[in-house]
Amino acid sequence: MRTIDLKPDPLGHAAPITHVAFRPDGKRLASCSYDGTVLVWDTSEPARPVPLTRLRHRRLVNAAAWSPTAPTLLATASADKTVAVWRIPEHGQHRLVTVLARHTDDINSVAWMPDGRRLICVSEDGRATMWDTPTGALLAEIGSHAAHCMMVSVSCEGLVATVGEDGMVAVGDPGRPATAEMRHYASSVEGCAWSHSGKLLAVARDDGVVNLLTPDLECLRTITVSTSAARSVAWADDDCSIVVGAYDGSLHWFDISGEPVRQVHDARLWPRSVASAQGLVAAGSFWNAPHLLDFATGAELSAPHRPGHGANALAVLGDRLHGDRLLVGCDSGNVLALDVESDTPSGVRVLPVSAGPVLSLVTGPDATFYAGTYAGHVVRHDGEDMTVSAPLGAPVPSLCLVGDRLVAGTYNGELIALDPVTLVEVERGVPHAGSVKSLSAFDGGFLSAATDRTVAAGPLHERATLWQHGNLVNAVAGLGDRVVASASRDHTVKVGLLAPRDTAQGPGRATGGRRAATVQTLLGPDESVKCVGLLGDPDAPVVLAGSYDFGLYAWEVDWQDSVGTLGSGRLVSAFRQGLSCMTPWDERRMVVAGWDGRLSLVGREQPDAPVRELRSWQVKELIEQADGVVNAESAGALDYGRVAS
């Protein structure tokens, strides 16, 4: 397993913050990050948090939890499939106490039992397990979900609550497994928190709703939070109110009766995690440090000061005046424009699009491009002026242009057609049953890939499934009007050759009169495959795919010999962090980006030569040399600035 190797930020994290956890006294805060580290902050003076120590895992860190009985013990959970228990003294060096290493998948969440000895861990494979931390022994498997188990919370009475993407909420006493209660929802449930008294369980749902449940899972209150996913929840010290983190980029406060109290919006927020203690609220961020707020007023006490420049999206902009330029959409909300034909790109421009992350890009005519944002807007940019759409109700991880329509795929699974000039919504298509992770124009319609495990094709109102993966699908790409490839969290890539229109008859995986005549499954990556692309001739294409295992892989497809295709797979290049996205530069070359800030141009120098890396750059260095860099303050003034209501 390769280890994340990012240059640390001395004042914070080098990548977005995934989780925050207060020590019960509120004087220490643990923040976890995609950079593979946990920072422990001194929050005794919330207006001036000080980083004290940095803990490391090999992969991104998903969660942390302080012991309820030993204030110096901290458990951290990682995508490296381990949970580490650390001793963090008030003064002096931290020490690794034990590693719980027999997990079979990424660990999403951890929570201590009231005895401060046993630890509950939940993972991507749906399992909930209980461990004895002094000995490192696995004590029992105490629950199982049909999909990713996302979070665990333990009450003061020792009741364990788990929630997952299968929509199930389960509550039980590990000592009496037969007494477990279960409740099912139609939407994914990704956040939960017991009240301090243990009398109520708050669960946060992907349909934007929070439910307050009794220990036997009777619903006492239903609170509509947002049109976007409610992702995290935390209780006030007196259990009289809650704060909810939603994927509209806001923190929402409600009293115990379900009445709204206030909302704080900040485009830097990544509220997949919120925590509270001693009158304080902490929240995750796309920037380098957590947000700290006053629970009673929502006032900002401290905030991050440095944006990240992780690349989330790539596109090629055809420009008659300047030639083709690569566009890079970043966590900072900027879009970087550059020419990749030279070893040292010149005339690099930084175009501010949003104060929050750019998740998707697509280019149009006349040097126009479109950006989908985490804030749930689509932005049209012609190089000078911008048009911003009305909110679409959820983050926009995918975009494509189809004829006279701009199609946006949302975190809620919607396919929304916009007028490409005015960005006014025109119509909505057949939705997916999960987040639409990727769109690609194809054969007069478009391809789509979603967390419902499907790859679909066709026009807006006549979608049909090409195939399914064993887990969520991260990306889809097309070549010509016959070849489709997809990348999945099941560690595989699928590539299919569609039958010609005039032979697409009878049963099969139809798609607007087409069906997949041949589908091959490609192996090689040992982690989730995040991005995929196709080069060359549809009769003998090259498939490229980037994985969370930091590898860029290539396969040469032989439609008559699937074994030969599989055997052709090889590692092209290894990055220092997971790969995030790719886009064709031309018919023989691809641009690939990683979360380590690296951009690479890969391809064949000759028709029969193997694919290899041709040149590479660092996003941060390109921004530093850019013409007219726009600072974070001016970018934030464009839209979505911090708003409290």
Image (tube, grey):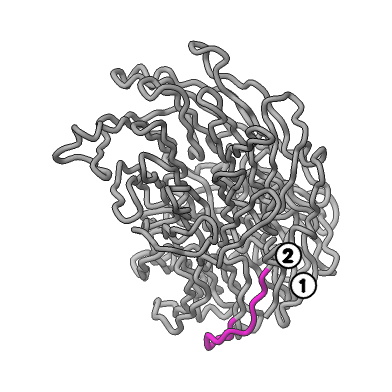
Residue 217: give x, y in percent of width and height.
40, 76
Q: Nearer the viewer, residue 235 or 555?
A: 555
In the depicted structure, whether residue 574 falls above or below residue 311: above
**Which residue lies under the disc numbered 1?**
300
Asked if one can make out residue 66 in the rendered structure from this viewpoint, the answer is no
Asked if the residue at tag 1 contacts the one at tag 2, i.e. Cβ–Cβ closer than 8 Å, the answer is: yes
Residue visible at 69% across and 61% down in the picture: 268
Q: Which residues are magenta?
A: 254-265
- Residue depicted at 81% across the width and 69% down the height: 46
Residue at the disc numbered 2? 291
Identify which residue is drawn at 71% across, 58% down. Answer: 30
Quadrant of res 346: top right
Task: Tell me the CA gap for discs 2 and 1.
Answer: 8 Å
Instruction: Residue 162: give x, y in percent of width and height.
Output: 46, 63
Q: Quadrant of residue 499?
A: top left
Using a 10 Å C-alpha cutoff, classify the residue at mark 2 as few (fewer than 14 neighbours), some (14 to 19) or many (20 or more): many
Q: Quadrant of the N terminus?
A: top right
